[in-house]
Amino acid sequence: MIEATSTPHIDFLAVTVGALVVCMLLEMLRPARDLAPAPARWANNALLALLTYGVLHVVGTWLGMLALYNLRPLTWPGLSSLPLWLDLPLAFLAIELLRYALHVAMHKVPVLWRLHAVHHADDAVDVSTAFRHHPLEGLFMTVPMTALFVLLASAPVVFLVYRTWDLVSTVLTHTNVALPAPLERYLRWLVVTPAFHRTHHFAERQYTDSNYSSSLPWFDYLFRTYRPTSDAQQRDAALGLDTHTRNEQRLDGMLLAPFVERRSTG
């Protein structure tokens, strides 16, 4: 007889919706920029997100089953053999370092930039931008991230906590919100803030190729890829890319954009 076991569970859809609602309220209460309503843009970003995350759900489930039944026995005892207070921060640092490296690669390797540019081509940055990623970019990120999770062999709760943290952080860092200056000044030493990441979406190349961190800013400080900006730049600097057309803001255009020849791809 198989006995039922209790495993940690988090409703990621509920977390995502909750984060979106809170951050949309912040955008209304303290907007960093005056953005005109853009229902067509929001709809296209949402459709791309549904497609990308649908693909990643299928692939992620397959990779997870492969890891569970085939790869896990090959790994070392893993971080799960450590106390949770060590397992959690070590796993977070390892995952964030990999994400930083993959993000830098997407800016430096032309074929990867073609995929990632779909995200950067959004000419306004708000909560809808958070999930605007090409399906192939999603696959590029998912495979090595899954491999790292397997190799780390952390406790299941660590994976759940990181996924929750990542979802909330992804939405928050793309939120069109201006935090109070003192809070912004101190928070950016601990976490990636909306202003910290908005700089990464500036149209000017020196800013696009900076501030790569996903949720913890420390690797940008360590590797000297952090670039500060003024309040005026945060309000007025151009966002997006001038290499993509208006048609490439539609769902079909975003899906085909990586395969279009253009005057600049980096």
Image (cartoon, rainbow, N blue to C red):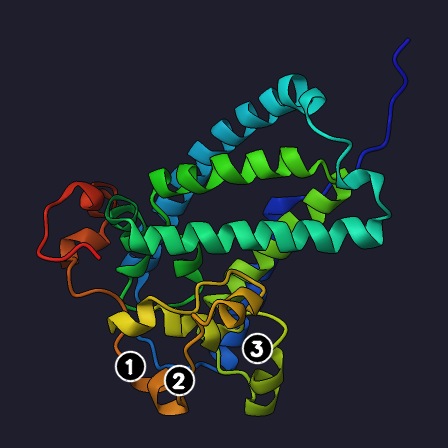
Tell me if label 2 and label 1 are in contact, CB under 8 Å. yes
* Of callouts 2 and 1, the N-terminal one: 2
Identify the mark at residue 229; answer none if there is no mark: 2
Task: Find disc 3 in the rendering and name its residue.
Answer: 188
Mark pair 2, 3: CA separation: 12 Å
Q: Residue at x 56, y 83 (%)?
A: 184
Q: Which residue is mark 1?
A: 237
Label 3, residues with CA under 10 Å away: few <14, some 14-19, many ≥20: some
Mark 1 or mark 3, earlier in chain: 3
Front residue of 88/245: it is 88
- Work out whether 72 lies above or below 16: above
Q: Is residue 226 left or right of residue 123?
A: right
Q: Is residue 16 visible?
A: no
Seen at 28% across and 51% down, the residue is 113
Give the x, y percent position of residue 249. Answer: 22, 55
Give how far apart the Cα atoms at labels 1 and 3 are.
20 Å
Where, quadrant-wise, is the C terminus in this rendering?
A: bottom left
Q: Nearest the camera: 16 or 137?
A: 137
In the image, residue 204 lies at what x, y percent? 25, 74
Regarding mark 1 in the picture, which secondary structure is present there? loop
| Residue 141 visible here | yes
Secondary-structure class at tag 2: loop
Q: Residue, x 60% and y 70% (percent of image)? A: 191
Question: Is 215 or 38 nearer to us in this picture?
Answer: 215
Q: Please name the amino acid that badge 2 sits on.
A: Thr
Mark 2 or mark 3, earlier in chain:
3
* Horizontal side, residue 20 vs residue 45: left or right: right
